[in-house]
């Protein structure tokens, strides 16, 4: 299996991602209308949802790579999984931070231990612990195998986070695919726009473009991170030779 | 109904502008720190690999 397509085209991928993010910013600030109730802060929504969506994708990619590694062990699967989780944690951090900043004017608090916010914190911690697991294992083969098993188990937290607001009563709004109307808290007046979709067509277009742009950014970062991993592997190989040379000398 | 509409019309949308700037500022900071970390690691590795290759060339000589 080769990842050369990604690693050889990092410059192009970076450029495409940069242009897409620039376009997204333009749409957010000049195309999307100002939300009536929340005002300007609602514009955080496009980045908040975009980064949340992509972090779920990164963890899904990591899950698939983990399963593929367990099925047919090849270091490339582990490489993609590692890069994906690292990027996913960055996107998840962005999601949590933007949500907290949005929460202050919307809910009058930076943080509440609601099911969604609690489950997303657990999810973040579980994926951060993935790096601790890798750091604790020296044998490369064992590291890859254990990490793959861990990724399969860790994805449960993504499912719980996605489902929490759809099953449990929560202050966090459900934008897509709400199942239980009562669970969303609309009857209690906990949120303004749950279940009703986006206010305008322009908001929908901006959100779609934002999600695509974040996906492109993920691909660009993934290519860069895999290239870095290739360099790390190469450095480790050369280091072994240098050490043996210095010992002989 | 009319009262709530009147209330909503009266809200200044720019009242939450500070939070918007804070949110985007922190998010871009996260992204920037990660990109700089990647770039820094790549630069250091490139230098290390070049140095080690030079050492191995010395060995060959």
Image (cartoon, rainbow, N blue to C red):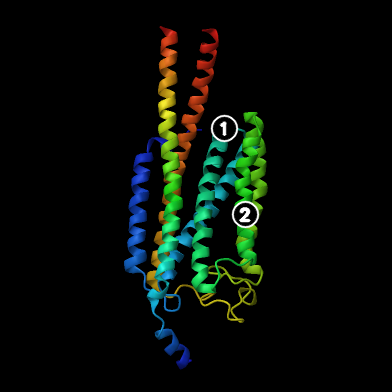
Q: Residue at x 57, y 37 (%)?
A: A78
User: Few, some or many C-alpha atoms within 10 Å of disc 1 (few <14, some 14-19, many ≥20)?
Assistant: some
Is B12 on the left-hand or right-hand side of A124? left
Q: Look at the picture and state if A201 lies above or below A139.
A: below
Q: Look at the picture and state if A191 lies above or below A68.
A: below
For residue A199, what is the image quadrant?
A: bottom left
- Please tell me which of labels 2 and 1 falls first in the chain: 1
Q: Residue at x 54, y 13 (%)?
A: A244
Is A76 on the left-hand or right-hand side of A224? right
Under circle 2, the secondary element is: helix
| Residue that mark 1 sits on | A75
- Considering every residue shown, the one lying at the far bottom of the view is B2
- Say if residue A31 shows up in the picture: yes
Circle number at residue A24: none
Q: Judge depth for marks 2 and 1 and give the one in front.
A: 2
Q: Chain of mark 2?
A: A
Label 2 to label 1, Cα distance in Å? 25 Å
User: Few, some or many C-alpha atoms within 10 Å of disc 2 (few <14, some 14-19, many ≥20)?
Assistant: many
Q: Establish whether labels 2 and 1 are both on one chain.
A: yes
A101 or A90, nearer to the observer = A101
Circle number at residue A123: 2
x and y, in percent, of residue A15 in the image: 33, 46
x and y, in percent, of residue B47 in the image: 40, 27
């Amino acid at each position: 299996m080769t990842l050369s397509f990604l690693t050889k085209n990092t410059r192009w991928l970076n450029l495409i991602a940069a242009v897409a993010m620039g376009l997204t910013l333009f749409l957010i600030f000049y195309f999307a209308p100002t939300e009536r109730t929340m005002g300007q802060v609602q514009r955080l929504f496009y980045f908040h949802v975009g980064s949340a969506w992509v972090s779920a994708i990164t963890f899904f990619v990591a899950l698939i790579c983990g399963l593929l590694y367990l099925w047919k062990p090849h270091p490339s699967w582990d490489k993609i999984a590692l890069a994906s989780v690292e990027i996913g944690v960055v996107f998840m951090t962005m999601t949590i931070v933007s949500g907290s900043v949005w929460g202050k004017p919307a809910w009058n608090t930076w943080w509440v231990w609601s099911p969604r916010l609690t489950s997303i914190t657990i999810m973040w911690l579980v994926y951060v612990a993935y790096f601790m697991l890798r750091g604790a294992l020296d044998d490369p083969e064992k590291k890859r195998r254990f990490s793959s098993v861990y990724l399969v188990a860790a994805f449960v937290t993504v499912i719980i986070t996605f489902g929490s607001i759809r099953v449990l009563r929560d202050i966090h709004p459900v934008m897509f695919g709400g199942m239980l109307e009562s669970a969303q808290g609309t009857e209690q007046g906990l949120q303004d726009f749950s279940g009703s979709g986006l206010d305008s067509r322009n908001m929908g277009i901006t959100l779609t473009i934002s999600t695509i742009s974040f996906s492109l950014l993920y691909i660009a970062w993934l290519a860069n991170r895999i290239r870095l991993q290739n360099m790390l592997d190469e450095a480790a190989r050369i280091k072994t030779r240098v050490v043996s040379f210095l010992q002989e000398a | 109904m009319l009262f709530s509409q009147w209330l909503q019309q009266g809200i200044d949308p720019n009242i939450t502008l500070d939070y918007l700037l804070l949110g985007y500022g922190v998010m871009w900071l996260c992204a920037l720190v990660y990109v700089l970390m990647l770039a820094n690691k790549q630069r250091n590795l490139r230098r290390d690999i070049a140095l080690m290759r030079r050492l191995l060339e010395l060995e060959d000589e």
